[in-house]
Image (cartoon, rainbow, N blue to C red):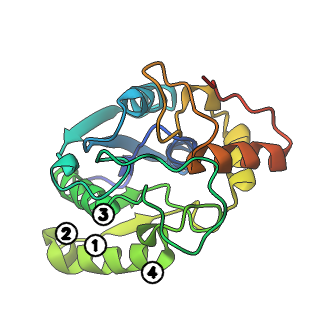
């Protein structure tokens, strides 16, 4: 590969505001974005439709969706017949919307594709400030996965190594909203709600909706979310 060849990045895309800003940041830094979404058996498909919109809108050169059936193991309100908590207060307990091993699986798929593409860079929009307390959204997880990637792959052993970028990790939702506005992200195209309807309209009451809405309020930005 010549020195002037574009750097390739695999960017995980969920269809929500965080992953949209992550794509925009990767593009701003000169990466050629290969967007990756995972159809894991989540409650609704509107977030996958949003992933298609976001990837195209923000200039990804391709968008791949990989299917894996996490409903077969369940264990989460997003993959089993368990009600999504609504208007829940703050708690130190990991909520039932946590999907066991989801980010580990998604990053593993991204890692495999990065190797195939000859990319040394994986980007994801995990956040450990305004978040639901999921253990696989913390800095320790990202650092551990990057270490794993560099002992488990040809790229890690023989090549330039693998880097996992989590640029939103220490940003508040308000910071993310402001950064998205700076980068020209159309947040109305994104879907964050845990139980959005088939048109992508949000419930306004789940944890994801409340964090998103508060972020726009704190940033002083009009909320573009479409609600039921």
For the residues bearing labels 1 and 2, Cβ distance under 8 angstroms: yes
Mark 4 in CB contact with mark 3 (< 8 angstroms): no
With respect to residue 6, does 92 lie above or below? below
The outermost residue toward the top is 199
- Mark 4 → mark 1, Cα distance in angstroms: 19 Å
Residue labelled with disc 1:
161
Sequence-wise first label, 3 or 2: 3
Nearer mark to the viewer, of 4 and 1: 4
Residue picked out by circle 4? 140
Check disc 3 and report the residue beneath it.
100
Q: Are marks 3 and 1 in contact (CB under 8 Å)?
A: no
Name the residue located 67 percent from the left edge and 40 percent from the top edge: 183
Position of residue 181 in the picture relative to residue 5 (left or right): right
- What is the distance, in whole Å, between disc 4 and disc 3 at their CAs? 17 Å
State which tag comes first along the sequence, 4 or 3. 3
- Identify the element where label 3 is drawn: loop
51 up-or-down from 121: above or below: above
Label 1 Cα neighbours within 10 Å, binned few <14 / some 14-19 / many ≥20: some
């Amino acid at each position: 590969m010549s020195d002037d060849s574009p750097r390739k990045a695999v960017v995980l895309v969920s269809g929500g505001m965080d992953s949209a800003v992550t794509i925009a940041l990767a593009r701003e830094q000169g990466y050629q974005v290969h967007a990756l979404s995972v159809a894991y058996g989540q409650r609704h498909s509107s977030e996958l439709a949003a992933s298609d919109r976001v990837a195209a809108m923000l200039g990804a050169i391709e968008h791949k969706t990989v299917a894996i059936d996490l409903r077969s193991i369940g264990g989460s309100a997003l993959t089993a017949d368990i009600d999504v908590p609504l208007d829940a207060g703050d708690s130190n307990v990991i909520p039932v919307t946590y999907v066991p091993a989801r980010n580990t699986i998604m990053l593993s798929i991204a890692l495999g594709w990065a190797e195939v593409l000859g990319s040394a860079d994986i980007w994801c929009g995990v956040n450990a400030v305004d978040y639901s307390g999921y253990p696989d959204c913390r800095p320790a997880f990202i650092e551990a996965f990057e270490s794993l990637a560099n002992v488990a792959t040809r790229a890690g052993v023989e090549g330039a190594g693998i880097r996992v970028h989590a640029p939103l990790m220490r940003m508040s939702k308000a910071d993310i909203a402001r950064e998205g506005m700076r980068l020209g992200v159309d947040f109305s195209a994104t879907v964050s709600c845990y139980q959005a309807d088939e048109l992508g309209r949000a419930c306004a009451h789940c944890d994801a909706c409340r964090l998103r809405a508060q972020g726009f309020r704190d940033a002083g930005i009009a909320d573009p979310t479409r609600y039921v």
